[in-house]
Amino acid sequence: MSHFTVGLGITAGISAYKILYFASLLRKNDYKIIPILTKDSLNFITPLSLQSICDNRVYFNQFELVENYNPEHIAIARECDLIVVAPATADFISKMASGAADELLLSVILSFKKKVIVVPAMNPAMYNHKATRRNLEQIERYGYKVIGPVEGWSACGDFGKGRMVEPEDIFYYIEEERGRIQGRLKNKKVLLTSGPTIEFIDSMRYISNLSSGFMGKFIAEELIREGALVEIISGPVKISYPSVCLVTKISSAIEMFNQVKKRIANNDCFVAAAAVSDYRPEIKEKIKLPKKDSIDIKLIKNPDILEWVSKNYFKKKFIVGFSATSNLKESPHQKLKNKPVDLLVVNPVGVKGKGPGEEINDAIIYDTNANILKELDSLPKKEIARHLVEMIINKSMSP
């Protein structure tokens, strides 16, 4: 991807302290940042700290004399691909709604012809005031995208809606916007399964596996970065998926299967990253079974979701399968013959420090004819996801 420049507008809210972390997230993901502060925001955040993290000059003076004259609000607006204002106070939103230009940041926004993202943060009573709601509606009519606020505790101790969304969520919205502009999977719809499934024995106990959902999360992040519209069907996980994804939460393999059948027709690509339980108890007891020295549980086979998708949608959708094996070097030729897919990712199980629940993994990626396309050894799962999405792009776009 080519460079992407974000104009980072910061106004005088207490949550401005979170913006240092947000700026760091942007820098780690190859964004260029132009920080633009309101004068009152200097009470909450220092230009030096921002300059150090953003590796760029910090702007806040609308009428500063410079050696080579160039109207700063015009020059900054021309350089940015997107502007995000976070936090955006009630006062600043009011000025945006009225078209005021008595701050450099306001002048830049008025000169800007592309996407503006506004992230409100204020006391719940201020957010719920009719004037604030009217102003937010007005800037949305201008075409600005408003993200949040969310419910939570404010700095003054009040609880309610007014808290700024977390930096990671703002980042995902920017990634989504960048994908729409520069991504190679623009408007492609991807259905992704992730995490484990659980199969209840009784009202308390269940059968499951060690899947954490991280692989699915990282694949979703890379797909979003490339402009894809991602829908996730996830088993129970402790992680959070990108906030721009539509996430359907399920528990069992049957529930996941039903959701896949319901949703796949409207998608261009299916990625089966979930670790689906192969078996389930034939009978689920409605109460907690009493403790005994031993119990017998009859297990029956769950539906094979990838097999069903392959049978019904191979050559109609781009399909990516995952397979866990104790022998990573064994050819998946027979498996691909029974369940043809466009790409098959094979991961090891039983290797210390790798695989389900771990941050590192090995992977071999095969094409539909069982030819090895790439061997990845001891890589972070995020890196494996990046390689996989690159292959999805190359394979799905090839003639």
Image (cartoon, helix red, strand yellow):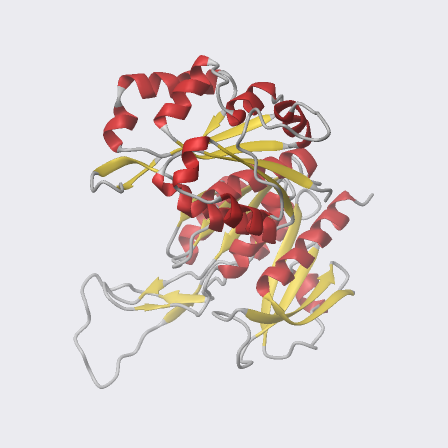
Q: Is residue 162 above or below residue 329?
A: above
Q: Is residue 10 left or right of residue 128?
A: right
Residue 259 is drawn in which quadrant?
top left
Q: Quadrant of the N terminus?
A: top right
Q: Looking at this view, name the residue that lies furthest to the bottom.
A: 293
Q: Residue furthest top?
A: 98
- Vertical placement of 96 versus 397: above or below? above
Q: Is residue 130 left or right of residue 5?
A: left
Front residue of 51 and 13: 51
- Residue under the point 65% across and 59% down: 339
Q: Nearer the viewer, residue 130 or 339?
A: 130
* Relative to 134, 226 lies left or right: right
Vertical arrangement, residue 347 with respect to residue 216, above or below: below
Q: Of residues 140 and 327, which is closer to you in this image? A: 140
- Residue 311 screen position, x and y as percent: 62, 51
Estimate the x, y position of residue 35 in percent, counting from the top left.
Answer: 56, 38
**Residue 121 visible in image:** yes
Residue at the right extreme, as displayed: 399
Residue 150 vs 211, above or below: the answer is: above
Relative to residue 330, is residue 14 drawn left or right?
left
- How far across and down, in percent of the image, does residue 167 sit? 45, 46
Residue that appears at 61% across and 22% down: 112
Res 119 seen here: no
Rendered location of residue 55, percent (x, y): 62, 48
Q: Quadrant of the C terminus?
A: top right
